[in-house]
Amino acid sequence: MTIGKAVAVAMFVALIPLTTQAQTRITPEAFLDAVQGKTVKFHDYPGGDLVGTEEFLSRSLSVWRMEGRGCVYGQVTTPNGQICFLYDDDPDGLPVCWWPFLHEGRLMVRLATFSYTEIQEVLSISENGLDCPSTPIS
């Protein structure tokens, strides 16, 4: 390991306590219980910008829409305490996985990788659908 890599790893490890304070991991099943049949708006944390809106059609199927883009359907799975999404337009065929958690009573998700620590906050859950084309058969 080079000195640069060692410093980067040390800095990352030093920041872990700051990013995990007051967090309570919840199961993907508990997350799905809260959002199934609903539409959820995900916002960047702590910036607050809208990342996108996801309608949870069932425990295994969702539809995602980013602002200014069309709808993309995804298969939802829950391996290893994570909630994972494999979208129809994903070029590499690999799911995107998140760890759901509560932070100061707010529902959030953290990208399930240690190389990139994106966090998104659920700022609204509604009964309103996304008005996307009909659900795909496949």
Image (cartoon, grey):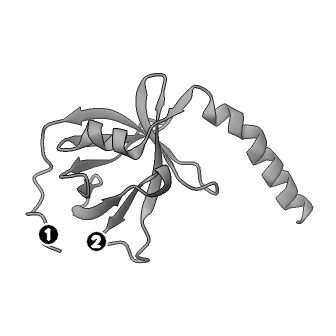
Q: Amino acid at mark 1?
A: Pro
The residue closer to the viewer here, 5 or 79, is 79
Image coordinates for residue 125, horizontal then vertical, percent: 24, 34
Q: Residue at x 12, y 64 (%)?
A: 135
Gap in angstroms between the C-alphas marked 2 and 1? 10 Å
Residue furthest to the right: 3
- Is 113 on the left-hand or right-hand side of 54? right
Image coordinates for residue 10, horizontal then vertical, percent: 82, 48
> Tag 2, which secondary structure?
loop
Q: N-terminal of the two: label 2 or label 1?
A: 2
Image coordinates for residue 76, horizontal then vertical, percent: 32, 58
On residue 136, the disc is 1
Q: Quadrant of the N terminus?
A: bottom right
Q: Residue at x 69, y 39 (%)?
A: 16
Picture layout, residue 2 above or below residue 51:
below
Image coordinates for residue 17, horizontal then vertical, percent: 70, 33
Residue furthest to the top: 104
Other-residue count near label 1 (Cα within 10 Å), few / some / many at <14 / 14–19 / ≥20: few
Q: Residue at x 8, y 63 (%)?
A: 134
